[in-house]
Amino acid sequence: MKKTLLAVAVAAALPAAAFAQTNVTLYGIADAGVGWQDNDVDGQDGSLVVNSGYNSTSRFGIRGTEDLGSGLKATFNLEGGVQFDTGRSDADIPSRAAFWNRRAVVGLAGGFGEVRFGRDYTPAFSSAGSTDIMGYGLLGNWLTFTVQGGIETRANNGVHYTGTFSGITIRAVYADGEQPKTRVGGIETVDGASGDIWGLSAAWAGGPLTVQGYYQEVNTRASTTAPITSGGDSVKQMGVGAGYNFGAFRLALNYGIADADNGTTVTAMRGDKFQGLGLGAGVKLGTGELLAQIMQFKVDNAANGLRDPKAKGFGLAYIHPLSKRTNLYATYGMMRNNSNASFALLASDVAVGSGALGSDPQGFAVGIRHLF
């Protein structure tokens, strides 16, 4: 009887011991605000809106690690978007589709860094965000460049790497488009590299200074009825950025290029090159911070005959913390398109679209963000 009780006690203790080695965290961001936006469409007034995700994209996630010993850990992360203005998940939005659309990775971490498999941010996107004064949030942030053709944000079916050594963070990705090479009558009609993404970035943080740079290629060719050139069509995305914190205020700079070849185009204006420049500043006001950013965009050789599409954007915001996890915010932004441009104004998960070529969208919002 004593042996039976001992066996039961040992068996009951084993799962607890195993669980003690595993760290699983539920986390998320709840962000919503009320705003006004104007798409600058003839015959339409601006409208009052309630939106999710001005400061940060609202989300829910699960992440965890297991200590495997000898400095090795197993890791995983599942993260999906949530719309706090409607209660929908991002899976209900056709353009996003997947429930865990933000991150879905599993990997190993150790002294070498971390290797992850699945869907994750690209090195270019993560790197450029480190020198965005607004941190990819609020009206007029650097997403205005990345999302409108500047950078591929995430990569499916990827092998992702992150490692930090002597203050330098290295990120790399290879993601397979999973397209078989196809030939018809000896002529290659589908490039096996279609949809492939590879990229590399480096960011150095030392004291008040941060500098970063990235390069990545996205193969965009799906099919053709004629022989294709080696490598197929692609978009080369590259950029640099820097930030400096002076204490009472900070400055940040971003510059990026998306260069398309072999008939591939970028942006809604369908050019073969998209360039963006952003300069931002942050000034402490009491316990909060006032943020401002100016941006300039240019599209070269627009395929639809548009001549030199250009735009200038501006964003202004104030963030007031109520605690370490909750803050209030107010944000204003505007985009000034020339007669051949139609760039939208973006916050983290909100877009104020351009009503037509030459339209100047603008918006304002106040809201609350809570991290849990």
Image (cartoon, grey):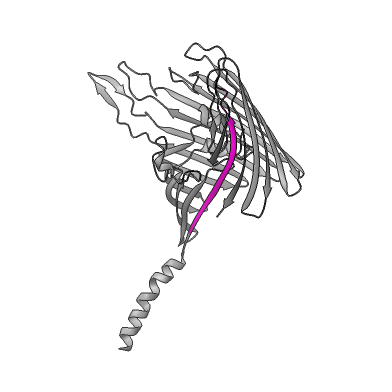
Is residue 364 in the magenta section? no
Q: Position of residue 222 (x, y in %)?
A: 35, 25
- Drawn side of residue 288 relative to residue 15, left or right: right
Q: Residue furthest left?
A: 185
Q: Which of 2 and 268 is in front in this view?
A: 268
Is residue 38 in the magenta section? yes
How many numbered marks does the figure carry?
A: 0
Q: Position of residue 40 (x, y in %)?
A: 58, 23
Q: Position of residue 87 (x, y in %)?
A: 46, 46
Residue found at x 60% / y 23%: 360
Q: Where is residue 285 in the image (x, y as percent from the top left)?
A: 76, 44
Residue 136 seen in render? no
Report the predominant secondary structure element of the magenta stretch: strand
If the image is split into quadrants, where does the C terminus sit? Answer: bottom right
Q: Which of 252 and 215 is in front in this view?
A: 252
Residue found at x 43% / y 42%: 90
Q: Nearer the viewer, residue 229 or 5?
A: 5
Q: Residue furthest bottom?
A: 1
Segment colored magenta: 25-43
Q: Nearer the viewer, residue 129 or 56?
A: 56
Residue found at x 52% / y 41%: 171
Identify the image quadrant of residue 94: top left
If the image is split into quadrants, where does the N terminus sit? Answer: bottom left
Residue 95 seen in render? yes
- Drawn side of residue 105 relative to residue 192, left or right: right
Relative vertical location of residue 242 with respect to residue 234 in this rendering, above or below: below
Identify the image quadrant of residue 352: top right
